Image (cartoon, grey):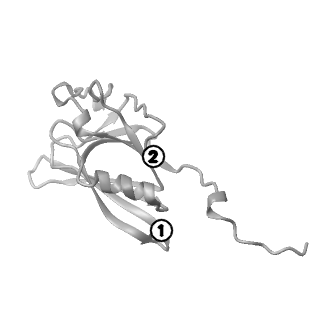
Amino acid sequence: MKKNFKKVASSDIKVGLKKRIYLANVRDIDMEKFPAAVAGKIATSPLGEDGKWVYVDCDTITPSCGAGEVVYNGKKSIAVLCDGMNADRLEWIYANVGEEFIAVYVDQISKKKIISGGPLGGLRMTYENLGIIDGKAGVALKFDAPECPEPFYYYEGETPVEEDAV
């Protein structure tokens, strides 16, 4: 065959979903009625009556939990890397930077959902990089929680989202 092998337009490349993190702004959480954990699990959604989950599709989710300054506390951090950048993503990031969220993601080893953030505070979102990451345009987000004695639980509740979410 004597045809050129032309570059494919990026809009024609379909990349499968790799990971998804669900976020609920702490203002949408009824902290007075935050569900209690039983045997290391939270069984119901912490959302208040008008609260909603949004999601961020990403390529990697890297959670970590280190020791806090107080002996029995932990400090939860979640790094999120997203390939690609466009105006919609920038608008969402700029509108949410500095906000605190409750986060739910799937642990890739156990395949179970993990929830982080709660009555002692949400995870504050910042961006670490907007631009070229590993040779590609991308976004690196970080979610940091304050120290707490129980920085995460397994989660068995629902995370329904509206189709117009991020």
Q: Toward which corner of the image does residue 2 lie, by quadrant? A: bottom right
- Please tell me which residue is depicted at 28% across the width and 32% down the height of the picture: 40
Distance from disc 1 to disc 2, alpha carbons, whole Å, reads 19 Å
Looking at marks 1 and 2 on the same chain, the residue that comes earlier in the sequence is marked by 2
Identify which residue, 47 or 111, lies in the foreground.
Answer: 47
**Horizontal and vertical percent position of residue 12:** 67, 58
How many numbered discs, if any?
2
- Please tell me which residue is depicted at 35% across the width and 67% down the height of the picture: 129
Q: Which amino acid type is shown beneath numbered disc 1?
A: Ala
Check whether the beta carbons of the residues at disc 1 and disc 2 lie within 8 A of each other. no
Q: Give left or right: position of 109 versus 155.
A: right
Identify which residue, 158 or 53, lies in the foreground.
Answer: 53
3 vs 25: above or below = below
**Which residue is labeled 2 in the image?**
20
- Please tell me which residue is depicted at 75% across the width and 72% down the height of the picture: 6
**Which residue is labeled 1 in the image?**
137
Residue 49 appears in the rendering: yes
Using a 10 Å C-alpha cutoff, classify the residue at mark 2 as few (fewer than 14 neighbours), some (14 to 19) or many (20 or more). Answer: some
**Horizontal and vertical percent position of residue 87:** 44, 59
